[in-house]
Image: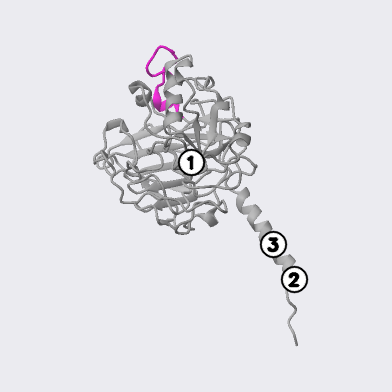
């Protein structure tokens, strides 16, 4: 007696529904819309060797080695982490070459961007730096995902009890907003801890990740990083006050907007987007021919110059037309005085012309 065979169309429909569910889970939203948990099913899935992303047809990536020279990053790291993170060959620390190859859809995508904003009062990241060797570690429990990423970024473990010991400083406070994030940087080990929806009194979080030695790494992982929509660390691309004080930013910035697509490209490891705009992980650049000295204030000129030299990566979905991430005001102590060398305000980047942005075909400009 022959066994009835399931029609191919049923299998196809079922697979399609599963794919849609995978992309719908884990929406991380900046600037006013709460996050939801990232997709657990993706977390242990490394990108294939030589693969760039979830975009068919993109040429194989040039991936920095996990053992790349960290340059001047020796342990312990300086107090306050007043030094550029990640190795010299990190995609976040390599300048965009002259005449980069642009994505064929660059102009169409950029039409949906702007004006830019830089809100630091909510839905961004407080930064706490500690000396882990002398800071008491406390156990935090995750109701969602707890993950420990290996130093080479190639594997992760998830404690069965959802617990991670964290050198959380006394008095640490999460950012305002339902996302409630915290970044903890251990200056003695280079470890980075990223927590989402933190309750410091109860010592709980919805999701939390420890990247072992992450600050000394290229700042990339081949496994899906649970934090953030694009599967990237929180600290990557964040503008900090000491950078504005010194007058230059020497790394790529973090960018989010409302039209991100469900596709992604290196250095992203996933996407929380559902639209038809830029893929997460895309690198954007301010046209180098634009005269940054035409901008009205010093802070805007510093950010614009970084956008020309290093660009910004699309890291998230946001409920606006373009956000540049700077450190949360609760730990940054930004000045509201436009004459100050620590000046920041939400509208400070709005004078940068979004229409002068462009999208690179690949992170390295090739």
The reply to whether callout 1 and callout 2 are in contact (CB within 8 Å) is no
User: Does residue 242 show up?
Assistant: yes
Residue under label 3: 14
Q: Is residue 337 magenta?
A: yes
Q: Is residue 320 magenta?
A: no
Quadrant of the image for the N terminus?
bottom right
Tell me residue 2's x, y (percent): 74, 85
Between label 2 and label 3, give the one nearer the viewer. Answer: 2
* Secondary structure under the numbered disc 2 in the rendered image: loop
Answer with the quarter of the image where residue 127 lies. Answer: top left
Callout in the foreground (1, 2): 2
Q: CA distance from mark 1 to mark 2?
A: 43 Å
Residue pointed to by mark 2: 7
Q: Residue furthest bottom?
A: 1
Q: Marks 1 and 3: CB-CB under 8 Å?
A: no
Q: Position of residue 78 (x, y in %)?
A: 26, 33
Q: Which residue is mark 1?
A: 196
Of labels 1 and 2, earlier in sequence is 2
What segment is highlighted magenta in the picture?
A: 326-344
Circle 1 or circle 3, nearest the eye: 3
On the image, the x and y values in percent for residue 174 come to 45, 33
Q: How many marks?
A: 3
* Magenta-drawn stretch, dominant element (helix, strand or loop): loop
**The one of 241 and 181 positioned closer to us in this rendering:** 241
């Amino acid at each position: 007696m022959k066994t009835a065979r399931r029609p191919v169309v049923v299998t196809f429909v079922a697979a399609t529904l599963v794919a849609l569910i995978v992309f719908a889970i884990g929406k991380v939203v900046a600037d006013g819309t709460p996050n939801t948990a990232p997709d657990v099913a993706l977390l242990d899935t490394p990108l294939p060797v030589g693969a760039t992303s979830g975009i068919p047809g993109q040429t194989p990536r040039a991936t920095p080695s996990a053992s790349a020279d960290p340059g001047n990053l020796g342990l312990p790291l300086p107090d306050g982490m007043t030094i550029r993170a990640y190795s010299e060959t990190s995609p976040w620390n390599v300048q965009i070459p002259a005449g980069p190859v642009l994505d064929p859809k660059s102009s169409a995508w950029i039409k949906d961007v702007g004006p830019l904003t830089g809100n630091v009062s909510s839905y961004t990241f407080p930064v706490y730096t500690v000396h882990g060797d002398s800071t008491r570690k406390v156990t935090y429990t995750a109701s969602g995902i707890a993950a420990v990423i290996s130093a080479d970024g190639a594997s992760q473990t998830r404690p069965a009890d959802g617990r991670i010991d964290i050198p959380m400083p006394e008095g640490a406070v999460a950012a305002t907003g339902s996302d409630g994030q915290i970044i903890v940087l251990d200056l003695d080990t280079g470890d980075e801890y990223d927590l989402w929806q933190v309750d410091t009194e109860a010592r709980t979080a919805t999701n939390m990740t420890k990247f072992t030695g992450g600050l000394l790494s290229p700042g990339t992982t081949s496994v899906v990083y649970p934090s953030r929509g694009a599967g990237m660390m929180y600290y990557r691309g964040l503008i900090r006050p000491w950078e504005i004080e010194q007058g230059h930013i020497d790394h790529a910035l973090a960018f989010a907007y409302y039209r991100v697509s469900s596709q992604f490209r290196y250095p992203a490891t996933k996407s929380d987007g559902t639209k038809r705009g830029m893929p997460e992980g895309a690198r954007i650049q301010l046209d180098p021919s634009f005269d940054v000295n035409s901008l009205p204030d010093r802070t805007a000129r510093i950010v614009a110059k970084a956008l020309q030299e290093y660009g910004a990566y699309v890291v998230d979905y946001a409920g606006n037309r373009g956000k540049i991430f700077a450190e949360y005001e609760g730990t940054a102590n930004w000045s509201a005085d436009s004459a100050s060398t620590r000046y920041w305000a939400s509208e400070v980047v709005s004078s940068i012309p979004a229409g002068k942005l462009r999208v690179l075909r690949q992170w390295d400009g090739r």
